[in-house]
Image: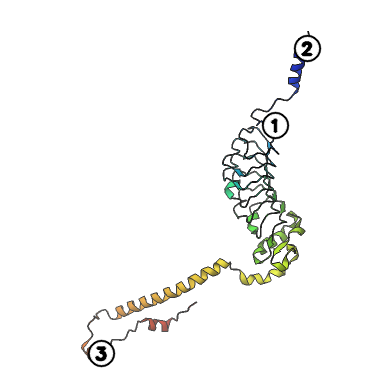
Amino acid sequence: MAGWSSLATLLAFLLLCPLPSPGCPAICRCSSGEVDCSYRALRVVPENLPTNASAVWLGYNHIAVLKAHTFRSLHTLQNLSLRSNVLVSIHSQALAGLEALQELDLSNNYLTVLTAETFLPLSGLVTLNVEANKLGQLPLEVLKALPCLQELFLHSNALRSLHASVFLNLPALHSLTLQGNPWACTCEIQPLFLWIMGNRDKIQEENLILCRFPEHLNQYPLLAIGNESFSHCQESLLHPRDYVFFLLIGPASFLASILICLLLGSLADWAENPSSSSTPAPDQQQMGTTPPWPGSCQHLRGERPLSAS
């Protein structure tokens, strides 16, 4: 009788205890669609994550690289956190398969660049957190694939400038952080300044967006500069590379015009003297002179002056 009682107790215990989710990595905890692999000293993302997971927490590990198709089978995943790892590289196909993802946390890592291909599968993404990385630039095309993005955290990176056009493809954006970056408050930042002034309701901690360069504006609030401070920028609209282009093309054009001038002179002379030959006329042989070239470069130059510029 005691044996039956013990068996009944064991069966009751097994029925009451939740069974581990199928496919849950042994090093993680899985419950109700959430997979918690935080603080596990992981160097790679576990391969056998549950395919029905709605949230995966991989924060506070030692993951440095996201390889191609890392999450390819997680088609229902809505929340992915990789905060506080040592991420330096994300393969362009690493997030393929995450078409249902709404929140992506890549904060507190070592990312220096983001590519447009990386976010192509995430058309439904609502929140992107890349704060506290090493991002020095954000190319215009990076966020084009995220039309539903509402929250973007860019603070505490290495951004010195950022073109306002990067936000034109984010019609749903309502929350943006930019503080903690070493902004260069020069003419190049004027478009961003004007965009911020027109979208101040979207900017969080706007008073903490501080200039780092030039030196006399170090720690000066960007929005306190005033639009009139950019009035002189209209005189220098060309990018430095444009000046290099003109310095190179100017002399080349000048030399080309001289060659064309000489060619036209030769053609004009040939057209006016089609029967002339290398043997001068008898009277010209006696005088030792050559016939004048009315179509020479000197003649053309008198009608249409050349300019070195």
Residue 107 versus residue 78 in the image, above or below: below
Residue 77: x %, y % from top left: 65, 37
Q: Which residue is farthest left? A: 282
Q: Quadrant of residue 253?
A: bottom left
Q: Quadrant of the N terminus?
A: top right
Amino acid on which disc 1 is placed:
Cys
Q: Earlier in the sequence, mark 1 or mark 2?
A: 2
Left or right side of 23 for 203: right
Residue 156 versus residue 302 in the image, above or below: above
Q: Which mark is residue 30?
A: 1
Nearer mark to the viewer, of 1 and 2: 2
Amino acid on which disc 2 is placed:
Ser
Mark 2 element type: helix
Q: Which residue is mark 3?
A: 288
Q: Which residue is mark 2?
A: 5
How crowded pointer 2 is (Cα within 10 Å; few <14, some 14-19, many 20+) is rated as: few
The answer to the question of whether label 1 and label 2 lie on touching residues, with beta carbons closer than 8 A, is: no
Q: Earlier in the sequence, mark 1 or mark 3?
A: 1
Q: Quadrant of residue 166?
A: bottom right
Amino acid on which disc 3 is placed:
Gly
In space, the residues marked 1 and 3 are separated at their CA atoms by 107 Å
Q: Which mark is residue 229?
A: none
Q: Quadrant of residue 159?
A: bottom right
How crowded pointer 3 is (Cα within 10 Å; few <14, some 14-19, many 20+) is rated as: few
Residue at (49% x, 70% y) in the render: 248
Residue at (48% x, 70% y) in the render: 249
Nearer mark to the viewer, of 2 and 3: 2
In space, the residues marked 2 and 3 are separated at their CA atoms by 137 Å
The answer to the question of whether label 1 and label 3 lie on touching residues, with beta carbons closer than 8 A, is: no
Mark 1 element type: strand
Residue at (74% x, 24% y) in the render: 17
Q: Earlier in the sequence, mark 2 or mark 3?
A: 2
